[in-house]
Amino acid sequence: DEPLAVTHFSVEGQSEFRALVFVPSKVPLELMRDMFSESGRAMRLYVKRVLINDKLEDLIPRWLSFVRGVVDAEDLPLNVGREILQQSRMLKVIRKRIVRKVLDTINGIRIQDPEKYSMFWNQYG
């Protein structure tokens, strides 16, 4: 299926990372039954192009669990455990930037293409 919106961005400064995030045009199958299930999360975290976690719950909030994407961070250590990631200040900065970018993307759809936004609202609203 063609995604409803795709955004690619890189951030430099406090933390350095690149992200590719997209909003599916239809609700993913694993979220059809339970929108907040843990198995429905699909944001992958890479550190220096090495996969760290493929269903990290701390990368996006539960209410954005329909968003899919990949994040490649440069500032996180490679040998990270889940507990270390949960306490990481860098992960909180990455999460904040991703949420802001997703909301900006959805708002951009609302302004530029109301028909596409109504389709989004019917699927996720």
Image: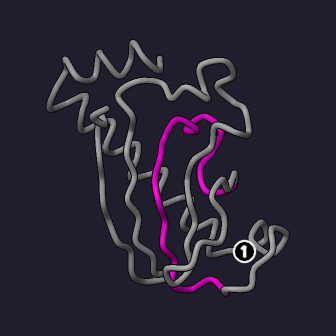
Disc 1 marks a residue whose amino acid type is Ser
Which secondary structure, mark 1?
Answer: loop
Q: Residue at x 55, y 72 (%)?
A: 46
Q: Residue at x 14, y 32 (%)?
A: 112
- The segment highlighted magenta reads 58-77
Quadrant housing the N terminus: top left
**Above or below, 108 relative to 51:** above
Q: Is residue 10 left or right of residue 84?
A: left
Label 1, residues with CA under 10 Å away: few <14, some 14-19, many ≥20 = few
Q: Quadrant of residue 52?
A: bottom right
Q: Residue at x 59, y 50 (%)?
A: 60
Q: Residue at x 47, y 21 (%)?
A: 124
Q: Residue furthest right?
A: 83
**Above or below, 125 relative to 96:** above
Q: Nearer the viewer, residue 75 or 70?
A: 70
Q: Is residue 69 magenta?
A: yes
Q: Is residue 26 left or right of residue 56?
A: left
Tell me how the rendering is colored: one colour
Q: Quadrant of residue 8?
A: bottom left
**Above or below, 93 relative to 74:** above
Q: Residue furthest left?
A: 112
Where is residue 20? Give x, y as percent. Answer: 37, 59
Where is residue 107? Give x, y as percent. Answer: 30, 36
Question: Which residue has dot 1 on it?
Answer: 88
Q: Quadrant of residue 47?
A: bottom right
Where is residue 41? Give x, y as percent. Answer: 62, 43
Q: Is residue 61 magenta?
A: yes
How many numbered callouts?
1
Where is residue 53? Give x, y as percent. Answer: 66, 64
